[in-house]
């Protein structure tokens, strides 16, 4: 027995006390055999959080289901993806009917010595996740073999303690799932709200406008116009710029500490990432000051995932723009930067204009010409600020929910490290 677990616990091989089965191939089953009804066929993509999305599953006929009884699912089974994105875990509950797993999955059915939800959580813990990481890093085609699970050592508390640990972690999971659902609803609400505000606006009474006119972007309120992005830039030197460096020069110019040199890793959808990895010296910054990034500038990625856009926060200090992003300074009396950012990230009329300039409808870069000529709806600046305020309020609520989710996930990780190793014991009445 391992000295790292309490004396009341026992180190066992998972296969000693669990039914573990996977199918090699599927006896010639092809997607053309999937049916609209019948037994549910579970794959890794159908696992959403802890749950299996039964509505998203494919189906197979009764013959295909019956030919492999060893992988027919039962309530409280644990399933894990063994190919592709390996290690994705699902827990079977509220089974809607006959169900089985496809060739990328493995079934784990704990016996009487195990409480199945405890095993489900143990496989999420650090010990097993290290096995997954080794598989991923050690092979170009990662795969979990059945023998990996059969021989896996699991420290097992007495059954009442297993149940108590699982109950604690399940309660945390419930909070995580509810918070995720709230975030998804808020995202949908925000998208719908912004589409509404940027097409119908906010009238003097706080309600949408009722009088509309035709425009190159479709129907817009009577009091609005349409403007090219270039006409909304500030009257400053270099209101639109990207950095000067080539990759070889970049390496030679970087220093260990200094003024941040920003790239695509700093620019995300509506989020500026302020973790800096590259720096230039004070001397180099002064030499290249025309590429300086300032608070409230709008940055757009033009390499990698093209078209991500965010507003630079007021805390930026001094920084330089790389050649992998466009950095734009807008006239604050003409356009609110957050609205430009939102439209580049989401608005259909912006994406349509980008695609019209791309090859084959695939956007692999954004030229300065495309950005300068980008047409945007132009509400009066007072109305823009009202729209931006509504955007800010719902964005703040979303950020608070995201912070809560992160905190609860951190709590779960800490609890798993303590409870699944016996470092902290639970009281069982």
Image: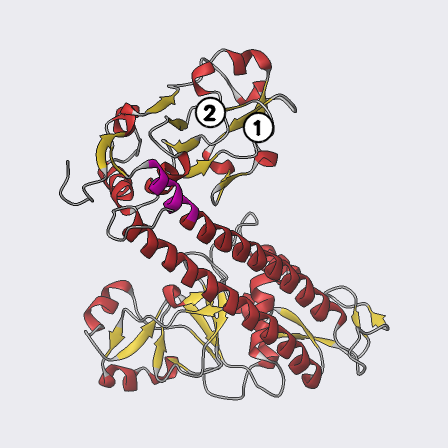
**Residue at (24%, 68%) from the top-left corner?**
249
**Residue at (57%, 66%) from the top-left corner?**
344
For mark 2, give the secondary structure.
Answer: loop
Asked whether residue 66 appears in the rendered view, the answer is yes
Q: Say which quarter of the image contains residue 241.
A: bottom left
Q: State the image coordinates of residue 11 (x, y, percent, origin top left).
A: 21, 34
Name the residue furthest right: 211
Q: Say which quarter of the image contains residue 82.
A: top left
Relative to 418, 222 lies left or right: right
**Front position in the image: 24 or 247:** 24
Say whether marks 2 and 1 touch (CB < 8 Å). yes
Residue 5 higher or lower than 79, as above or below:
below
Report the magenta residues as a range.
159-167
Residue 336 higher or lower than 157, as above or below:
below
Which tag, 2 or 1, sits closer to the chain's start? 1
| Disc ID at residue 58 | 1
**Residue at (25%, 43%) from the top-left corner?**
127
Relative to 288, 331 lies left or right: right
Q: State the image coordinates of residue 428 (x, y, percent, origin top left).
A: 36, 46
Q: Is residue 258 magenta?
A: no
């Amino acid at each position: 027995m391992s000295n790292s677990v309490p004396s009341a616990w026992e180190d066992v091989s998972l296969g000693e006390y669990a039914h573990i089965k996977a199918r090699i191939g599927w006896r010639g089953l092809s997607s053309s055999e999937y049916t609209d009804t019948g037994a549910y066929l579970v794959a890794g993509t159908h696992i959403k959080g802890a749950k299996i999305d039964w509505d998203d599953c494919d189906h197979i006929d009764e013959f295909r289901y019956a030919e492999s009884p060893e992988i027919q699912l039962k309530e409280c089974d644990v399933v894990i993806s063994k190919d592709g994105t390996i290690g994705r875990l699902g827990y079977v509950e509220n089974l809607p009917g006959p169900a089985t797993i496809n060739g990328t999955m493995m079934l784990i059915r704990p016996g009487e010595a195990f409480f199945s939800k405890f095993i489900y959580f143990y496989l999420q813990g650090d010990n097993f996740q290290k096995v997954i990481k080794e598989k991923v890093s050690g092979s170009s085609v990662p795969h979990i073999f059945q023998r990996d699970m059969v021989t896996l050592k699991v420290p097992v508390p007495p059954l009442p303690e297993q149940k108590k640990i699982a109950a604690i972690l399940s309660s945390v999971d419930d909070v995580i799932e509810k918070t995720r659902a709230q975030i998804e609803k808020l995202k949908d609400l925000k998208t719908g709200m912004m589409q509404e505000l940027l097409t119908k606006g906010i009238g003097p009474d706080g309600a949408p406008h009722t009088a509309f006119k035709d425009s190159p972007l479709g129907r817009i309120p009577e009091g609005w116009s349409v403007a090219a992005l270039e006409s909304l830039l500030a009257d400053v030197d270099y209101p639109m710029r990207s950095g000067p460096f080539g990759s070889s020069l970049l390496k030679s110019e970087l220093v260990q500490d200094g003024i941040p040199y920003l790239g695509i890793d700093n620019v995300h959808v509506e989020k500026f990432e302020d973790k800096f990895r590259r720096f230039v010296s004070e001397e180099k910054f002064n030499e290249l000051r025309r590429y300086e990034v300032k608070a409230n500038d709008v940055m757009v990625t033009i390499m990698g995932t093209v078209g991500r856009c965010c507003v630079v926060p007021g805390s930026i200090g001094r920084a330089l723009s790389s050649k992998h992003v466009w950095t734009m300074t807008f006239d604050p009396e003409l356009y609110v930067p957050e609205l430009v950012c939102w439209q580049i990230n989401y608005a259909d009329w912006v994406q349509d204009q980008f695609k019209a300039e791309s090859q084959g409808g695939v956007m692999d870069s954004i030229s300065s010409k495309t950005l300068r000529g980008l047409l945007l709806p132009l509400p009066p600046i007072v109305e823009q600020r009202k729209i931006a305020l509504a955007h800010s309020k719902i964005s703040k609520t979303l950020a608070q929910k995201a912070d809560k989710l992160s905190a609860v996930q951190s709590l779960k990780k800490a609890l798993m490290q303590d409870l699944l190793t016996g470092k902290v014991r639970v009281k069982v009445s």
